[in-house]
Image: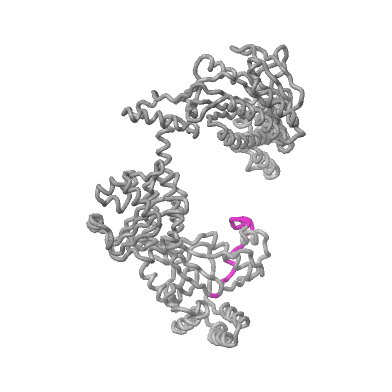
Amino acid sequence: MEPLYDIDQVGPPITFQLSFQPFVDYLNDQRNEAPSTALAQFYSYLIDQFTPVSLSDRPTDLLDADQLKELFQLATVAVLPLTGSSQNIPFAFGLPQPLTMYYQSNAFSDLAQQFPDLLVGLRDHAKTTNKQLLIYQLILEKIYGIRTTKQAVLSVDFQRDVNGLTRSYRMDVNLSFMNVRANGVVPPLQRAWVDFANGITKMPPVADPLVVSDFIFEGFAFFRIEDITEAQTIQQLQEVFAHLQSDTEAAIYQRFEKALRNLCGEPDLQISIVPLPQVNGLFVDHPELRSRSVFLRHSSSNFRGAISDTTAQQKIQNFIQHSIPILFPDLDGIPEPERALLHQKGIRSFLMYPITTTNEVLGILEMGSRHRNALNEEVLTKIERIMPLIQELLRYQLRQFHDTLEGLIKKQFTSLQPAVEWKFYEVAWEALRSRQNLAATGSSMRVEFSQVYPYYGAIDIRDSSIERHKAVRQDLLDQLTAVNELFSQMPLPADTDHFNRILTQCQRWQTKLAASLNFNDEQNITDFLVQELHPFLRQLLPYEEEWGVSLQQYFNRTDPQTGQFNYALNVYERSMNWINATINDYINQEEKKLQAIYPHYLERYRTDGMEYTVYVGQSIAPMQPFDQDYRRRLSEWQLTSMVEMAQLTHRLVPLLPLPLQTTQLILVHTHPVNIAFRQDERRFDVEGSYSIRYEVLKKRIDKAYIDGTRERLTQPDTIAVVYSHSMELTDYLPFIAELQERGLLQPDMEYLDIEPLQGVSNLKALRLHIKYDAVA
């Protein structure tokens, strides 16, 4: 019989031959497992029809056309479900390579006629790896009796444009009715073949590959085409969110709307997804968002303007409260003049769908079609399936709106903390009320708080610079040692002078590192490794298999970015980051408690540890009286939190890759300061000569020494409380005594004088010793 379609072979040469014997084997298995006598008799009848053909010496593909057609019609009954008309299902029987169809259903034929290049295009779309995987699995199962854990599926996805819509299809190629025989001696089984067939390796083995041309595949393939437009459309809608950060807003909506048109089957569907943004709890009329609306952009100006008044607010609330889609199959029920405007724009059916959740008002989905009754319950059902995606897109639009709104303020000021946010809005309102241009006058918009009390604390990692220096030195020593070991395994290359010069440099740097390391040495060694040593080693990679493995192992230990060993540095940085994360999490939690005591502004700095300053005072919270009791409570919090942070970092020490310790410091400053927002640095800064003295103290106190000694003030297991006058300790001493009674501080305290600092003298400190056997 001449095949209906015969497409040239592509890919590796594989021999397929038409045979009914594998199908007869399948029918025998089905008969043996049949749950009823009637079904067993049915399979027996089919076996009787196919057995003579399968045992015939005549090549199967030369059978009479009518006989082949009859046989494949019988095969259809066994392969497809017995319910429904098989002719409505696009399927065919044939061979996959060259792509040959011997029998096809009417639905398959219709698709082939509708898309003449359908089968020609299919041969290029099947994934090569999937085809190879399936062939390997068939050979292993049929020849070697090895069934893989996960069976490969050979399928081809393709799309065609139909009347302005994109239809998606998938053709599955089922090789269940296919046997394999060796065309000669069966080659010995290779482990690499099994690994590839099981998906352990992603590519077929390069050495000793399975030669598929040594095997013959006998049987037939079953081809079935499925319309997957809806599933593909939903996937395309999901993919929109993967491009939110990279695509333009116009491209995002174009993707979403095109996919919705495909889903609904309406190429000229007008779609808008309109968010309903709120400012201070009221819906606002945003011209840009309104312009996207199918309904509002065609509505009267009175309606557009009314969104800002009380009546319009109530109408919107009533509309979204019930969250029920309103469907107008033929525009009946839409009030004039909106109905006339929609009709004038060619819209004949219309849908408005309020999109809400239990806790959110998100927006409205609108659809307009040129055809009456095009928008119906079937469309609503499809929309329900993608409702979570529509909700997420509206959330994205609302986030964009609020980010833009907040950006107008943050562009002029900073990321605002709730306690001081009101002040920025107040200043911005004053500028707007006086008709100033916000962008032009931003530099003159002054935000300041007067007479606020600063509470400064610092938790530093002890000797962090020294520990980092030691880690870098250790990594460089390890790397140079590894290079020397590598060179000891190498045969001498042709260019011995170059080899000896590099080896000498390695040994010289290794000797120098054993003694010390300064910054210049670190940079010079790094330059030598990256610019001289590594290019030399990479030239040798391809040539010597014997020591090439060791060479590759060496490069595997280097950082791809720097070319250096970084194990010790990573250990240091992991330990430091663990400590900082612990402190930061603690500060975040405590800051919430502290806001409950009194509204304040918290400024923190990330160093090799953490520094913070809490500014608190009447000017930050004008409506809440600030008195001495709040100051005492803040002093108590500062002491207690320092003890608790020291306890936390102490408990971390045995868990850290590198046991780092922390030091704790509190700077007492009982005089209020003035702070003002600096737009150039996007932060608050102190003002006034006396206030500036406080800033100088903060910058220099952590490196201070005890007067007359070379002992640093800050030490592990202690809290250094720095002050200028003994009266400044008044608020702290009762809480120190309380912490001592609770067993959190040792009873002994050190009153110390601090050596003069540049520009600052007469400082004193109270050093407290932490007791770790109690739980903070």
Give 295 or 232, whichever is nearer the viewer.
295
Asked if residue 503 shows in the view, the reply is no
The secondary structure making up most of the magenta span is loop
Is 523 on the left or on the right of 470, as rendered? left
Is 596 on the left or on the right of 191, as rendered? left
Colour mapping: one colour
Q: Is residue 206 above or below residue 701?
A: below
Q: Residue 480's spot in the image, x, y percent?
A: 70, 31
Asked if residue 119 shows in the view, the reply is yes
- The residues colored magenta run 200-219
Q: Exactly how many numbered labels are in the figure?
A: 0
Give 105 or 308, whichever is nearer the viewer.
308
Quadrant of the image containing the N terminus: bottom left
Q: For residue 259, which quarter of the picture?
A: bottom left
Give 23 or 364, whichever is nearer the viewer.
364
Give 282 or 659, whichever is nearer the viewer.
282
Q: For residue 672, which quarter of the picture?
A: top right
Indicate yes or no whether the magenta region holds residue 203: yes
Quadrant of the image containing the C terminus: top right
| Residue drawn at point x = 45 percent, y = 32 percent | 422
Indicate yes or no whether the magenta region holds residue 92: no
| Residue drawn at point x = 39 percent, y = 54 percent | 320
Q: In this view, does 347 lie above or below 286?
A: below
Q: Is residue 676 above or below residue 380?
A: above
Q: Residue 709's spot in the image, x, y percent?
A: 73, 14
Q: Residue 573's spot in the image, x, y percent?
A: 65, 34
Q: Is residue 304 above or below residue 405?
A: below
Is 558 on the left or on the right of 745, as rendered? left
